[in-house]
């Protein structure tokens, strides 16, 4: 059963900034990205990218394909179908959380630490 609380849907697997960047970059292509393209796009080192790809692959969020092109190894990373679905759920939850924060901080809105009582007076939380 899915929680109605959007905070509960902020999956740690995607919430890490570098993995968020990797997943976002992969969303922009149906043909995947090579290791070097992804490394350049996300501005990560080989080791750092490898570590995040391993985490995402273990979670089945991505699929890694290793081939040879003109006798040279080529690694291409793709979003998996389940990874795409879970990332979309994460983005929807993140959007809801950010929307709530933006509404709470909008000009003319009471600061979240101030709540209205049932008697019409304000009290500090």
Image: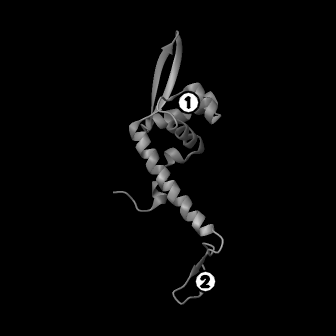
User: Which residue is drawn at the image coordinates 54% and 36% (left, top)?
Assistant: 52
The quarter of the displayed image where residue 35 is located = top right
Q: Which residue is mark 2?
A: 123
Quadrant (top left/top right/bottom left/bottom right) for the N terminus: bottom left
Position of residue 93 relative to residue 115, above or below, is above
Label 1 SS: helix
Q: Earlier in the sequence, mark 2 or mark 1?
A: 1
Work out which residue is located at the far bottom of the displayed protein and give it. Answer: 119
Residue 50 is marked as: 1
Q: Position of residue 25 (x, y in %)?
A: 55, 37
Direction left: furthest residue:
1
Instruction: Give the quarter of the image for residue 19.
Output: top right
Q: What percent of the width, then of the height, locates residue 104? A: 59, 69
Q: Are marks 2 and 1 in contact (CB under 8 Å)?
A: no
Q: Secondary structure at mark 2?
A: strand
Q: Residue furthest top?
A: 71
Mark 2 → mark 1, Cα distance in angstroms = 51 Å
């Amino acid at each position: 059963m899915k929680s109605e609380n959007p905070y509960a849907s902020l999956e740690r697997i995607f919430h890490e900034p570098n993995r968020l960047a990797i997943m976002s970059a992969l969303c922009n292509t149906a043909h995947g990205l090579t290791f070097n393209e992804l490394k350049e796009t996300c501005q990560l080192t080989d080791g750092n990218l490898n570590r995040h790809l391993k985490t995402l692959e273990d979670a089945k969020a991505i699929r890694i394909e290793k081939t040879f092109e003109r006798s040279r190894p080529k690694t291409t990373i793709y979003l998996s179908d389940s990874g795409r679905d879970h990332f979309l759920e994460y983005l929807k939850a993140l959007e809801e959380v950010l929307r709530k924060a933006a509404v709470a901080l909008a000009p003319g809105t009471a600061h979240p630490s101030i709540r209205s009582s049932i008697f019409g007076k304000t009290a500090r939380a």
